[in-house]
């Protein structure tokens, strides 16, 4: 399995704060069946977690990979970013300051949770204009999606992909997030599921629960599609098959 969204790079954001924590997170992931993890530190949060593409950031990725190798943990660490899609994000991508997952065409992006749909769509347009394919992080957590989940169908039709957090499915972020995540799953509006892990105690990298849920609630094929098939295509920079069923009626969660 592949986890495309993790905060396992130590000491760069609100995720892992030190190497022992990162190692615990990677071990948890391995035990739950994950063999590849994308380290996606928060980036482009000006004055907070900027994490632009610099030699220092590249060295931090390599140090984590070497640490995992020294501990003989058979998990591959891939480079990525969770990019805060503020105005001007397209120019930063064009200038090479921000990069996609595995330095490919898919960019994990997040927005303010209270952003209006038109504001998000403006940022999506910026990304598409520089040939960046938006992979919208934790799409179920945006208030506009919780109010009007049919927005996600339009975003996918417009060229975006979506990721939901495994914790949302179990209600760990709240009732609205849980309802939104399940509704999107039911309508094939989820491209992949990831941990969005931040620690080894609370928001962990353990993915066994979501694997079991997807297999039991849907089937093994769906589980593998969301946790391995589509994530592998994203890592490879390969096309993702069209997906999504239209929500024919406005639904307020």
Image (cartoon, rainbow, N blue to C red):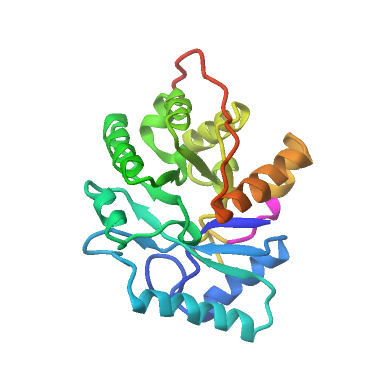
The residue lying toward the viewer, choosing from 216 and 150, is 150
Q: Residue at x 56, y 42 (%)?
A: 239
Residue 166 seen in this snapshot:
no
In this view, 186 is above or below 50:
above
Residue 185 placement (x, y as % from top left): 60, 33
Q: Main secondary structure of the magenta part?
A: loop
In this view, 60 is above or below 121:
below
The residue lying toward the viewer, choosing from 16 and 98, is 98
The residue lying toward the viewer, choosing from 163 and 183, is 163
Residue 123 seen in this snapshot:
yes
Q: Residue at x 53, y 61 (%)?
A: 202
In this view, 190 is above or below 16:
above
Q: Is residue 228 left or right of residue 59?
A: right
Q: Quadrant of residue 225?
A: top right
Q: Residue at x 43, y 26 (%)?
A: 154
Magenta stretch: includes residue 239: no
- Magenta segment: 205-209
The mark total stands at 0
In this view, 184 is above or below 82:
above
Residue 221 placement (x, y as % from top left): 76, 40
Residue 76 placement (x, y as % from top left): 62, 69
Quarter of the image that includes the N terminus:
bottom right
Q: Quadrant of residue 81?
A: bottom left
Residue 197 placement (x, y as % from top left): 52, 60
* Extreme residue in the bottom direction: 70
* Extreme residue in the top direction: 249
Q: Residue at x 78, y 42 (%)?
A: 220
């Amino acid at each position: 399995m592949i986890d495309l969204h993790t905060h396992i790079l130590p000491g760069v954001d609100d995720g892992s704060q030190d190497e022992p924590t990162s190692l615990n997170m990677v071990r948890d992931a391995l035990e739950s069946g994950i063999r590849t993890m994308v380290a996606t530190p928060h980036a482009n949060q000006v004055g907070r977690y900027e994490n632009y593409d610099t030699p220092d950031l590249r060295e931090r990725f390599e140090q984590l990979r070497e640490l995992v190798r020294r501990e003989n943990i058979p998990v591959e660490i891939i480079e990525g970013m969770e990019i805060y899609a503020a105005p001007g994000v397209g120019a930063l991508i064009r200038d090479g300051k921000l990069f996609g997952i595995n330095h490919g065409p898919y960019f994990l992006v997040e927005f303010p949770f209270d952003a209006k749909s038109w504001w998000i769509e403006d940022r999506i347009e910026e990304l598409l204009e520089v040939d960046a394919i938006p992979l919208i992080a934790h799409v179920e957590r945006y208030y506009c999606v919780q109010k009007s989940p049919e927005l996600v169908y339009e975003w996918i039709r417009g060229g975006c992909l979506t990721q939901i957090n495994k914790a949302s499915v179990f209600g760990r972020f709240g009732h609205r997030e849980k309802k939104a995540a399940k509704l999107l799953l039911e309508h094939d509006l989820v491209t992949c599921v990831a941990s969005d892990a931040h620690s080894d105690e609370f928001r962990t990298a353990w993915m066994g629960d979501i694997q079991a849920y997807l297999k039991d609630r849907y089937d093994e094929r769906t589980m593998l599609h969301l946790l391995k098939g589509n994530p592998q295509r994203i890592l490879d920079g390969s096309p993702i098959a069209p997906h999504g069923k239209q929500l024919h009626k406005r639904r307020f969660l």
